[in-house]
Image: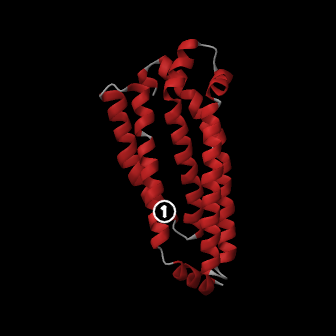
Amino acid sequence: IGRLGVLPLSVHTIPNQVIMAVSMAPFALGVALTIRMGVTLSQSVSRAKQIVVATFIFSVILLGTATIIMYLLSDWIISLFTTDDEVKELAQRIWWKVCAFNFNVSIFAVLTGVAAGLEKQWTLGAVNFSFLWIFGVPLTYYFALIRGGGLDAAWTWINIPYICMDVTLITIFVCADWSKVQEKMHKRN
């Protein structure tokens, strides 16, 4: 982003800082879900699935509400970081994409908990590496810098890998054999 210039870099710093702070809660939800899954899955596959579905629905509602609030408070949030009118204007232009990214990353954070609970950390790593590093970052670079789309394109294209990761992980978890994970747990104990 620094290659786009001082103004885009200044703007980019605002959502970067906000998302880093806000994403701590979803990652904490993911960690809590991992722990709860570890305790429950060894006893009951169906109960573990219920906990995951309930936590996921709760997370979508909670994190979706937080994202809507983040969108509605954009003027206030941006003004915490700058008084420069140019920075504020450009930040406002991309803010809806920033909010979409926040939601996508938040869902991803919760899904990392499910991945760990199902012992699918390598699968999570492969999905993350493939969509983010092989697909997402190069496309973001291409459209933002090479094609000249700037900061707006960067925030558009960085959302797509997270949407793909979220959908892929949900599909993997739905199709996974949770009973096999439970059997492995019993063998270890």
The answer to which quarter of the image holds residue 172 is bottom left
**Image quadrant for the C terminus?**
bottom right
Q: Where is residue 170 in the image (x, y as percent from the top left)?
A: 48, 62
Q: How crowded is mark 1: few (under 14 residues within 10 Å), some or many (20 or more)?
A: some
- Quarter of the image with the N terminus in it: top left
Q: In this view, does 17 lie above or below 111?
A: above
* Residue 26 pos. (x, y %): 64, 51
The residue located at (63%, 52%) in the rendering is: 61
Question: In the displayed structure, does residue 37 sit left or right of residue 169?
Answer: right
Closest to the observer: 134 or 8?
8
Q: Mark 1: which amino acid? A: Ile
Tell me which colouring the rendered structure shows.
secondary structure
- Label 1 residue SS: helix
Q: Residue furthest left?
A: 147
The residue sitting at 51% across, 41% down in the picture is 101
Whether residue 179 is situated above or below residue 138 in the rendered picture: below
Quadrant of the image occupied by residue 40: bottom right
Q: Which residue is drawn at 52% across and 82% down?
A: 180
Q: Which residue is drawn at 65% across and 80% down?
A: 42
Residue 11 x %, y %: 53, 23
Q: Name the residue under label 1.
A: 170
Count up the numbered dots. Answer: 1
Please give left or right for residue 167 compared with residue 17 in the image: left
Q: In this view, does 104 lie to the left or right of 48?
A: left
- Residue 10 picture location, percent across and down: 54, 21
